[in-house]
Image (tube, rainbow, N blue to C red):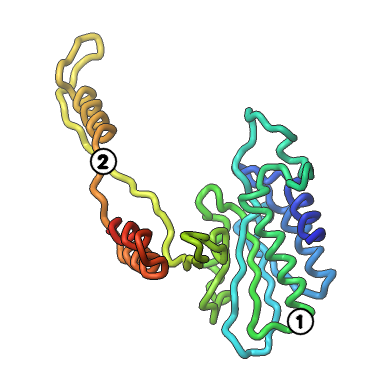
Amino acid sequence: MSQVVSLVQELIRFDTTNPPGHERACILHLRTRLERAGIRCRLVGRSTDRPNLVARIRGRGAAPPLLLYGHVDVVPADSQGWTHPPFSGALKHGVVWGRGALDMKSGVAMFVETALRAAKESPAGDLLLAVLADEEKGGAAGAAYLVDRYPGLFRGVRHALGEVGGWTMPMGGKRLYPIMVAEKQSCLIEATVPGPSGHASLPHRGGARAKLCALLATLNSRRLPVHVTPPVHAMLRAMAGALGGARGLALHGLL
């Protein structure tokens, strides 16, 4: 555990604020640590300043490959009140402080430690480690780049643990294990608001800007319709069945 804590502190001390990212130094630090243990690493990226690290630990072939993936870029920490400097990695009262301590340099440190242990123990199946850049701004230089340009790296993978994978959800005295099968996405809506043209020096009542303001006010005051998608439906039904009783009925009622 102490090795994981030390690695989290080391990773936090790399300022990988995105934008611009500059994840290279942090990624190279991880490559050095892995290669010292005999794990071969491959760096691929859209630019040399923002590489992604991929390493595969060969297993016994008794199970499909398992992917562990995480990112080392972080959101900005400027103009925020921090108890300890955001890139210090300070350890105070048993807690590591810093930008990325949760999202998600701690997760990356745990995955790297897992890879180091797997290299000594010969896992049942291959263990694939992917440490990514550019997660916080959409992944164009990170996950999207790898999937689009190097899909063969992930051949045979059926299961993966990432930022929100493999954690437990205590509920009603029971321990549930969520399985992530979908991800939130943005929904861009384009609206065209017609109105009479004219010079800005002359007032226009009920023009395009007034209609746009009314549209925005309506969107702000009303709730959009709820569509329960198949993954959400399956999740709530499974959780309700596992809990049973009053809690199960309450969860089922959300449908």
Closer to the chain start, of discs 1 and 2, is: 1
In the image, residue 141 lies at what x, y percent? 57, 55
The amino acid marked with disc number 1 is: Glu
Under tag 1, what secondary structure? helix
Residue farthest to the front, as pictured? 245
Q: Which part of the image, by quadrant, shows the N terminus?
A: bottom right
Numbered mark located on residue 185 in the image: none
Place of residue 51 in the rendered image (x, y in percent of width and height, measured from the top left): 66, 58
How many tags in the picture?
2
Asked which secondary structure carries label 2, the reply is: loop
| Residue underneath mark 2 | 223
Answer whether residue 156 is visible to the viewer in this image.
Answer: yes
Task: State left or right for residue 166 relative to residue 223.
Answer: right
Q: Residue furthest right?
A: 36
The image quarter containing residue 181 is bottom left
From the viewer's perspective, is residue 88 above or below residue 152? Answer: above
Identify residue for label 1: 121
Which residue is rendered at x = 56% and y = 75% of the image?
Answer: 154
Q: Is residue 154 above or below residue 189?
A: below
Residue 50: percent from the left, percent from the top? 65, 54
Residue situated in front as seen by the camera: 1 or 130: 1
Left or right: residue 106 compared with residue 5: left
Q: Nearer the viewer, residue 235 or 102?
A: 235
The reply, left or right, for residue 209 in relation to residue 205 is: right
Horizontal side, residue 208 vs residue 157: left or right: left
